[in-house]
Each structure stands twice: as C-alpha cells, then as structure tokens.
Image (spheres, grey):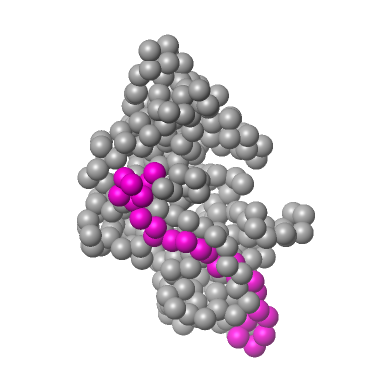
Amino acid sequence: MIELRTVGADAFEEILPLLQLFRNRRMCLEDWRRMLFDHPWSDGSPRGFAIYDGGRAVGFLGTIYATRLLAGRTENVCNFSSWIVEEPYRGASAMLMRKMVKELGGLTLMGHTPHPTTIGVFTLLGFRPFEQESLLLFPAPGLRFATSLLQGTIALGPGMPLDALDEEERRIVQDAAPYPHVCSALLQRGGRRCLLVARLERPREIRFPRGVRSAELLYVGNRDFFWENRELAHLAFLRGLGTVAVSIDLRLAEGRRIRGAVRIPRPRLYRPSRPEISPMELDGLYSELMTLQE
C-alpha cells in the first residue's frame, strides 16, 4: 500500500538507497547526510516528504529549512532538493510536490537545481524563475587589478574578524563553517567591506583543464563593492578554494556589461510567500548548493 509521509533526520538510512539512484560519484554517504539530513541551523525540522510502499521508501523530496531576512521581515524559508521516485512509482511523483506546496504554502520555497523536465510541473504549482543564467568571470590582470590587491585586504574563514560583521553576517559565517567545500571571505578596501560566501564547483558547460574549478557565489553582501573590487574576490577564492574563476547569478550583475564573462544556463525557481519578495532578495545559502558536488 502506497503511503505519503513526512520524514525527519532519523530517516536517512531509509532514504539513502533513493539518493544513490542519482549516480553522483562525487557524493559520498556523508555528503548526502550533510546536505539533506544534518543541517544544525534547522535542528528538529522535517527533512522532506517520502512515498513508501510496504514500509520501503520509493520516492523522496528533500526540504532544507532556514530563517532568513527577506524584504524587511524575518521569516522561515524552505529550499527543496533531490526529487526522485523509483520508475514503477513515477505516476505518484507529483504527490510529493503537491504535499510540499500544501503544507508549506506560507513559506517562500526555492529550488536551485530543478531538472529541465520538471519545470513545467513547478510552473503549474505557482513557481516562477528567479534566475535563468549565471556569469562565469575570469581575472583580468592590469593596473586596476594590481591597485585593488595593494589597497584591499582579505580575511578568510576562521581568520575573519567577526566584529567587523553585523549579526546576520556573523550567523551566516558560522553556519557555513562546517562545510568543507564552502568558503567565506571578507573583502575590505577604503573603509568599505563585502562579505562573500562561495562553494567549489566545476560547471559542466565549460571544459576546464583537469583539476581546475571555479567558485560559485552563494552570497554577496555588498554588490557594488564586489563589482568595483572583484579582483579581491578572485584572490580570496584562489587562496580559500584553489579556484581561478568566480561565477555569479546574472541578476546580480544588475545591467552591467561584463567583458569576457561566459554565460551558463542556471534555471532557479521560487514561490514567494509575499509579493514583495523579489528575485533580488534571494541567494544560495541554506540550500543543497552548500554540499552538492557535481
């Protein structure tokens, strides 16, 4: 008999066989656990919805909850991830999404890695894009590059002066710290500052030389500062993650013309709890991106 359940952190062993159907060789058992079942900032919250048949999990949709400041109000949000259903039960797939929308309709819902074949289903349930592409940026050495490096300072992870951050940013840095493929960087220059949080990635659309990767920005605290001093960001993540390029969601370029940038498809969806929550309010923190390895 098919049954739809809400599952908690204790269901990891039951759900793991489904997650392994993604055949992601870069993700080990502990990566899956950390991504979907062991996020301490939302301890005790449900970890997703699952379809069971005779006590065995045959479908799953992960939910990652967090408290965020959106459009002037602190509220709960949910990033969903890892929607998968065994082939014989695909007819019941939509049950998972409908249950999530029904139970979490009062929250802002976000999906950072929807499969192209499922976007139509999301649209019918009230989701809309908050991003379509990202920009892959490479260093551009020159006078500006040298000046920025000479006049600016960089602090990474544990060496970051937390008293230079506001309360929300201190919490972000502390929550990101346990994730080995995520790096926080504080850039400072001329009395101004910018907190960045990035994850290690290797875009499938770009043929990088073996071992070369980029840093995908999950959070940009001061966008104007970033664009005026992005040479500092390249150096920060070269040190912190060993990357040579940085990628950023296209909407955060805010109409700027960026020479030499490579555009990469990055469809991302959301269903806001309030009309005031625009795509510019959203970021990649507290989502599967903090652990996902591609």
Q: Could you tell whether 287 is left or right of 137 in the image?
A: left
Residue 31, image x and y in percent?
56, 37
The mark tally for this picture is 0
Residue 186, image x and y in percent?
49, 66
Q: Can residue 127 be found in the magenta stretch?
A: yes
Determine the residue positioned at 29% across, 40% down: 101
Determine the residue positioned at 61% across, 54% down: 201
Q: Is residue 156 visible?
A: no
Quarter-wise, where is residue 192 in the image?
bottom left
Determine the residue positioned at 48% across, 38% down: 82
Q: What quarter of the picture does the N terminus occupy?
A: top left
- Farthest bottom residue? 143
Determine the residue positioned at 43% across, 72% down: 223
Residue 99, image x and y in percent?
30, 33
Q: Reply above or below: 100 against 257.
A: above
Residue 46, image x and y in percent?
34, 32
Q: Reply above or below: 229 against 273.
A: below
Q: As rendered, which of 109 and 40 lies closer to the eye?
A: 109
Highlighted magenta segment, given as a residue range: 121-145
Q: Is residue 142 visible?
A: yes
Quarter-wise, where is residue 236 in the image?
bottom right
